[in-house]
């Protein structure tokens, strides 16, 4: 995968996420549209998909997939 790794926070936990540049651009655009920062969006995505407090285990590969699905879902909802 050709991607860029960035450090983010999910709740109080720091982790890194590797996404393609286009996905990072899309996520930043979502942040601008929703007036939230990347850490807030990532925490919301994690909590929505796991139903756990943010200090629980954060699995990098699974979370990256969840983030991609969130980005796709966001833009699909706009397209409808």
Image (spheres, rainbow, N blue to C red):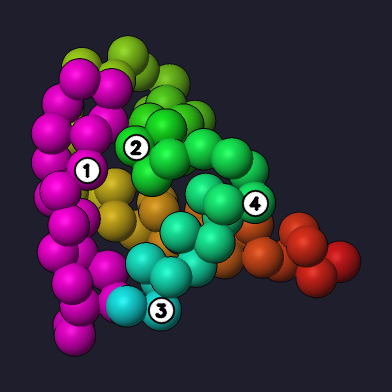
Which of the two marks, 3 or 4, is nearer to us in this view? 4
What's the mark number on residue 22? Answer: 3
Q: CA distance from mark 3 to mark 4?
A: 16 Å
Q: Quadrant of residue 18?
A: bottom left
Q: What residue is shown with label 2?
A: 39
User: Would residue 3 be counted in the magenta stretch?
Assistant: yes
Q: Look at the magenta stretch and give its main secondary structure.
A: strand
Residue at image position (30%, 77%) is 20
Compute the Cα span from label 2 to label 1: 6 Å
Who comes first in sequence, dot 3 or dot 4?
Answer: 3
Q: Quadrant of the C terminus?
A: bottom right
In the image: residue 38, left or right of residue 19: right
- Please tell me in which quadrant of the rendered image residue 45 appears: top left
Callout 2 crowding tier (Cα within 10 Å): few <14, some 14–19, many ≥20: some
Please rate how many residues cluster around mark 1, counting C-alpha atoms within 10 Å: few if below 14, some from 14 to 19, many from 20.
some
Instruction: Locate residue 21, reporting x and y percent.
Output: 32, 78
The Cα–Cα distance between marks 4 and 2, rounded to whole angstroms, is 15 Å
Q: Which residues are magenta?
A: 1-20
Q: Secondary structure at mark 1?
A: strand
The front one of 16 and 50 is: 16
Q: SS at mark 3?
A: helix
Is residue 2 visible from the viewing direction of this image?
yes
Numbered-mark total: 4
Of callouts 2 and 1, which one flags the residue occurring earlier in the amino acid sequence?
1
Judge from the rendering whether residue 6 lies leftward or rightward of residue 78; answer left or right: left
């Amino acid at each position: 995968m050709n991607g860029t790794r960035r450090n983010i926070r999910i709740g109080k936990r720091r982790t890194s996420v590797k996404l393609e540049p286009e996905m990072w651009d899309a996520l930043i655009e979502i942040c601008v549209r929703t007036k939230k920062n990347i850490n807030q969006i990532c925490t919301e995505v994690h909590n929505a998909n796991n139903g756990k407090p943010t200090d629980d285990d954060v699995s990098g590969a699974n979370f990256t997939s969840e983030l991609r699905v969130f980005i796709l879902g966001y833009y699909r909802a706009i397209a409808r």
